[in-house]
Image (cartoon, grey):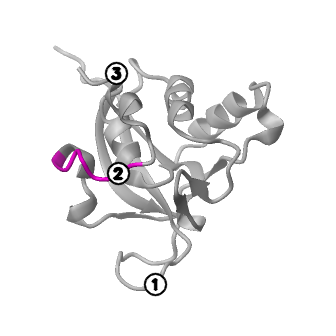
Amino acid sequence: MVETPKEEELFLAGGCLWGVQEFVRHLPGVVSTEAGRANGTTDSTQGEYDGYAECVRTRFASERLSVERLMDYFFEIIDPYSVNKQGPDEGEKYRTGVYSKEQSHLDSARRYIEARTDAYRVVVEVSPLSNYVRSDEEHQDRLTLRPHDKCHIPSKLLRKYKV
């Protein structure tokens, strides 16, 4: 009998979700990604901004990819010192964050940050996932479908792990 790899999920907010999704989808051990919104107050993408962070729901095979290694990758594409801004995108919805329903994931993310020599400067939010809403279809896999759309992540990084 073949054992199915254990899948876990972590929600990564790193500014505009288009580039984050394109980068994360190619990482070794990532099973799937989905563009979405974390920790807002509504269950809809319609209407006014409700406090959410743009994020990428990241499902990964935990035998192949640890939370700590995923954090290594994530820190390649974010400015961890910037509050509510990544590249040209500004506003609370573009904050950096790591969200999960699993306390062990949050503990791993916090330990990762605390072990950095620049930990005192890092402003990445690490919080329990309280709400998740899938983004509209036009935002799913945006840079895969429209590779010439603008993105705050340099194209060299977006291609770094592409096979």
Residue 95 image point, x, y percent: 59, 57
Q: Secondary structure at mark 1?
A: loop
Residue 103 image point, x, y percent: 61, 43
Pointer 3 with pointer 1, Cβ within 8 A: no
Pointer 2 with pointer 3, Cβ within 8 A: no
Q: Which mark is residue 48?
A: 1
Q: Tell me how far mark 2 sits from mark 3, CA to CA.
A: 19 Å
Report the predominant secondary structure element of the magenta stretch: loop
- Residue range corresponding to the magenta coloring: 145-151
The kind of residue tagged 3 is Pro
Q: Tell me how far mark 3 sits from mark 1, CA to CA.
A: 36 Å
Q: Nearer the viewer, residue 148 or 78?
A: 148
- Residue at left offset 56%, top offset 40%: 78
Residue 99 image point, x, y percent: 54, 49
Q: Tell me how far mark 1 sits from mark 2, CA to CA.
A: 20 Å
Q: Give the labeled residue for mark 3.
A: 28
- Residue at left offset 22%, top offset 63%: 138
Quarter of the image where the C terminus is located: top left
Q: Is residue 42 above or below residue 25?
A: below
Mark closer to the chain start, 2 or 3: 2
Q: Secondary structure at mark 2?
A: helix
Q: Give the labeled residue for mark 2.
A: 18
